[in-house]
Amino acid sequence: MPTTFQIEDLKAIYAKRWGIESEYYYLKHRLQIENFSGYSVSAVLQDFYASVCINNIAATFVGDVELDSQSKKKHTYKANKNILLGKLKNRMVKALLIGGAALISLFERICEVIVRNVIPIRPGRAFPRVEGWKRLKYPPNMRGAI
């Protein structure tokens, strides 16, 4: 006997998956996880693990920082992961080399940047898809610095 579903049930199920889909989008387009700096197995693995590592570190920062969502503003806010990624990639090597109080101070400054750069969460927002000109997704001579 075939099972039938209501459209509202399918929408609710898909909405529960939306966070996972957003994370895949972030990995593919912001961190360029499919764009490798070399062709050897070790270069591909190194780029992949570096991207996943920086994404996990960014998620840790986002989870640790408390945003002021109780203010009298129209929307609730979340951290801007693009700004956070830019700050992390410029400071990650330094953070791994220093230790002690300097490391804690560096992390506190990054947390302050997160709190200053927030974006609103706008429920029910939708835009029509526009099919544009297709180009090479990752040109071979263009690798973003992670």
Image (cartoon, rainbow, N blue to C red):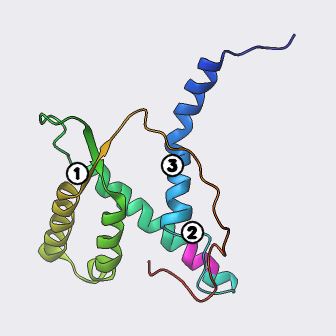
Residue identified by numbered label 2: 33
> Splitting the image into 4 quarters, where does residue 82 fall?
bottom left
Residue identified by numbered label 1: 65
Residue identified by numbered label 3: 22
The quarter in which the C terminus is drawn is: bottom left
Residue 135 point in image, percent of width and height:
66, 73
Residue 5 point in image, percent of width and height:
70, 16
Report the number of discs: 3
Q: Residue at x 22, y 51 (%)?
A: 65
Q: Residue at x 59, y 18 (%)?
A: 8
Q: Residue at x 57, y 69 (%)?
A: 33
The amino acid type found where label 3 is placed reads: Ser
Q: What distance separates the C-alpha of mark 1 from that of mark 3?
A: 20 Å
Return the mark for residue 19. none
- Queried whether the magenta region covers residue 121, the answer comes back as no
Q: Secondary structure at mark 3?
A: helix
Residue 14 point in image, percent of width and height:
59, 32
The amino acid type found where label 2 is placed reads: Ile
